[in-house]
Image: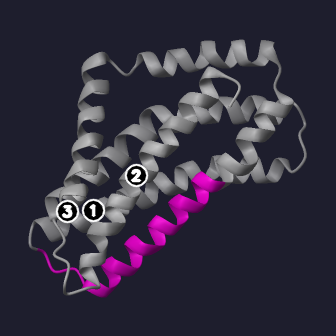
Amino acid sequence: MSTAILQKLNADHKSIAKVLYCLRAQIKGYDDPEVEPNIGQIMDILDYICTVPERWHHPVEDIVFTRLLEKNPPHPEQIRAVVAEHAELEQLTQELKTAFERVAMDIAVPVSLLYHTATLYLSRQMLHLEAEESVLFPMAEDYLDEDDWLDIEEAAQQVLESLDDNAEREYDNLRDAIIHFTDAD
């Protein structure tokens, strides 16, 4: 990764992937009687995913991908599809969170539906991360020049400034707690 923005986005992907793997470990409990899912842990994971990618990560990616589209790269439909996926994934995350909130309130939710929905969600998230890392980030490196990156960094700074130090620390701590909770199991 040649720019600070791409380095940050790549680091975010690593963190998000770790959190998604933790969700996968918890979801396994709905299909494996040997594993006891922890609904509190699942809710923490969904809180992290609903907040960090949606408020700070995706808006910065959208800035990069919008600028990339202005350069007339090959396969612009793939870039537009990934950008559209941000909204779709945010909607799916909210739906999954709502389903698990029902579980947390002891409202009946069919376990097979919960497991199937969560498994599909995880697959879509991981495919999304892979498409960005293997196709779009390298394309951005190839097509965007230094002036583009300066403009992107300026626009991204406005998004990232909405993340105050306390919120950043809180979500970093939440991510670490999620990852360490699963490591302790």
The residue carrying pointer 1 sits among few (fewer than 14), some (14 to 19) or many (20 or more) residues within 10 Å by Cα, namely: some
Q: Which of the two discs, 2 and 1, sits closer to the camera?
A: 2
Q: What predominant SS class does the magenta segment belong to?
A: helix
Read off the residue under disc 3.
101
Query: In the image, what residue type sits under mark 2?
Result: Lys
Read off the residue under disc 2.
18
Please report whichever mark, 3 or 2, sits nearer to the chain's N-terminal start.
Answer: 2
Location of residue 146 (image quadrant)? top right
Q: Is residue 10 left or right of residue 113?
A: right
Quadrant location of the N terminus in the rendered image: top right
Read off the residue under disc 1.
98
Q: Residue at x 76, y 40 (%)?
A: 138
Residue 129 part of the magenta segment: yes
Q: Is residue 83 left or right of residue 50?
A: right
Residue 111 part of the magenta segment: yes
| Residue interval drawn in magenta | 107-130
Query: In the image, what residue type sits under mark 3?
Result: Glu
Location of residue 85 (image quadrant)? bottom right
Q: Position of residue 105 (x, y in %)?
A: 9, 66
Q: Is residue 118 left or right of residue 9?
A: left
Query: In the image, what residue type sits under mark 1?
Result: Thr
The residue carrying pointer 2 sits among few (fewer than 14), some (14 to 19) or many (20 or more) residues within 10 Å by Cα, namely: some
Q: Which of the two discs, 3 and 2, sits closer to the camera?
A: 2
Nearer to us in this view, 148 or 1: 1
Residue contact at pointers 1 and 3, CB within 8 angstroms: yes
Q: Position of residue 69 (x, y in %)?
A: 81, 36
Q: Position of residue 185 (x, y in %)?
A: 18, 63
